[in-house]
Image (tube, rainbow, N blue to C red):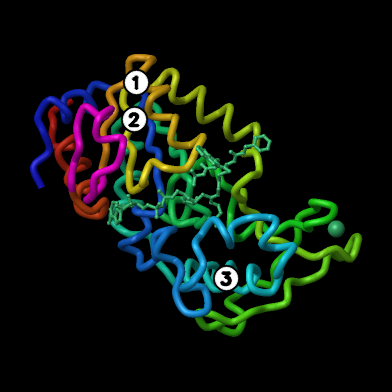
Amino acid sequence: MDIPADLITTVHNANHVVFLTGAGVSAESGIPTFRDALTGLWANFDAEQLASADAFRRDRELVWGWYEWRRMMVMKAKPNAAHRAVAEISSEVRRVDVITQNVDDLHERAGSQNVIHLHGRLNRPVCFACQRPHELSPGIPDEPEGGRRLAPPRCEYCGGYVRPGVVWFGEPLPRREWNAAVAACETCDVLFSVGTSSIVQPAASLPSIAARHGAMVVQVNPNWTSLDDVAAFNLAGGAAVVMPALFEAVRARPR
Ligand code: BV8
Ligand code: ZN
């Protein structure tokens, strides 16, 4: 994959790089992208119908089953070359922030530190009633095959139902994570938007915030998104191919 020379120079000279990632960065780990994660029982739902508090109130076993199925897939998956390249580039750039919309832990397992999770995490469930964290039993419980309903656990403090620790549609993003993401975008030299359809707000507004503060915006996505018009470079390829190629090119530059 050819990386434009002036992009390599910009990254090589950058003091602060931000990676904003979406489901596409985990695609090559075998995790279906957000809009593809609807198979089996869920084939006739659209994501926004399942990823909401109303859906959980309407049918908590359907929703809990969907998230447990996704969590099992993540536990069985491995970080791919894109996650690893994002982690490794930290040794070449003074400051790197990883801001993810993903609810998996593949960036952490690839070695990235202090990952900012805008939309929560699959492995951090909380009580729907009192919001206290709930400890999941370790290991991969029996495989809820794609499409099984599962009864969510009960909160040990108040008896409420446990819900996935993710931000659902219509719910506000966690304030600390959102503020940290905006602050990083206001001072970075380069923002890479990797594997996101750039549809979900307010996450999709981050690249424009970075561009308004003078950052170069680079998109990595095999498909067109509305960000194509904002990005200085559109690297049309899979993240697991493009990101390692970028990292190699930057590392090959003499210091
Ligand atoms: C809020 C956690 C307010 C759950 C998620 C109308 C206009 C504008 C906004 C709205 C509107 N109506 C409603 C809204 C707001 C709404 C929204 O944005 N809706 C969208 C659908 C228009 N947003 C919200 O509700 C947010 N909250 O606004 O609150 C508020 C304020 C105060 C008080 C109360 C309320 C909350 C949004 C968070 C929702 N939760 N996730 C879960 O995961 O189940 S979002 C969900 O979508 C995932 O996090 C996912 O990451 C995210 C975005 O999807 P992508 O990551 O982009 O994944 P997708 O499948 O879409 O795309 C994959 C991309 O990868 C594709 O482009 C593909 O080409 C590419 N790709 C594929 N393979 C590869 C690849 N790229 C690289 N390499 C590859 N190999
Ligand atoms: Zn509780």
Q: Position of residue 140 (x, y in %)?
A: 58, 77
Q: Report if residue 6 lies within the magenta region.
A: no
User: Toward the viewer: 52 or 110?
Assistant: 52
Query: Which region of the structure is painted magenta?
Result: 221-236
Q: Is residue 65 above or below residue 191?
A: below
Can you tell which quarter of the image residue 251 is in?
A: top left
Locate the C terminus by quadrant: top left
Q: Please indicate whether residue 124 sits to the left or right of residue 185 in the image.
A: right
Decide: few, some or many residues near mark 3? Use Cα within 10 Å; few <14, some 14-19, many ≥20. Answer: many
Q: Amino acid at mark 2?
A: Leu
Q: Earlier in the sequence, mark 3 or mark 2?
A: 3
**Marks 3,2: beta carbons within 8 A:** no
Query: Which residue lies at the image location 63% right of the left edge and 68% below the top edge?
Result: 63
User: Toward the viewer: 231 or 81?
Assistant: 231
Q: Which residue is mark 2?
A: 191
Q: Amino acid at mark 3?
A: Trp
Query: Which residue lies at the image location 42% right of the left edge and 18% below the top edge?
Result: 187
Q: Which residue is mark 1?
A: 211
Q: Position of residue 189 (x, y in %)?
A: 33, 21
